[in-house]
Amino acid sequence: EQLKGFESGSVSLEKLTVDGGASLRQEIIRYYRNNTNGVSVKMKLVVSRCYGLEHDAQNAAQLAESYVAVFTNDFRGWRILGTANGMLGRNDRALDAYRKATNLGDNDSYSPMAGVALEENRLDVVREIAPQLVKLKHSKDLPKFVKLDIIGLLSVYARRADDREVF
């Protein structure tokens, strides 16, 4: 019923995957395993995020790929796919997914995108998104820990690239 609520728009992704806690996520995963044919493509976004939050990146990536193949303009699917690919060490795929998410307006994907790019020593990617990271660092809407993460990423980038302007 909760998945049907998500599909109809009456239940949010956040409510099903975060607010409901681990027990609801595990219930959704069990339901999916027992009813794979009864789960619509749209519902796969929820299931994918549940898998990701339960540290099953392989299933999260598989379902997110299925979702974004249909819902190409939903940054949430691309963000989940980026995170899952990053967890699997498929950093080129993660960067591609995060880039698609940010191109669709997702500000929450800039920080993990920079983290993956630095891991791969792709300073060109961080250089490209540094202005957005600086703007986000000053955002009043972000929690302090996210701002600190952005500051850390920018500091690592500035040091590696010898880019004093970022400081």
Image: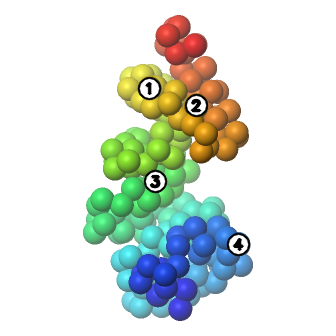
| Separation (CA) of disc 1 from disc 2 | 11 Å
Tag 3's secondary structure? helix
- The kind of residue tagged 2 is His
Classify mark 2: residues with Cα within 10 Å, few (<14), some (14-19) or many (20+).
Answer: few
- Of pointers 1 and 4, the one earlier in the residue sequence: 4
| Separation (CA) of disc 1 from disc 4 | 35 Å
Residue depth check, mark 1 versus mark 4: number of the one nearer the observer: 1
Classify mark 4: residues with Cα within 10 Å, few (<14), some (14-19) or many (20+).
Answer: few
Q: Position of residue 132 (x, y in %)?
A: 45, 32
The residue under label 1 is 131
Q: Are marks 1 and 3 in contact (CB under 8 Å)?
A: no
Classify mark 1: residues with Cα within 10 Å, few (<14), some (14-19) or many (20+).
Answer: few
Q: Residue at x 64, y 35 (%)?
A: 147
The residue under label 2 is 138
- Of pointers 4 and 3, the one earlier in the residue sequence: 4
Number of dots carrying numbers: 4
Classify mark 3: residues with Cα within 10 Å, few (<14), some (14-19) or many (20+).
Answer: many
- The kind of residue tagged 4 is Gly
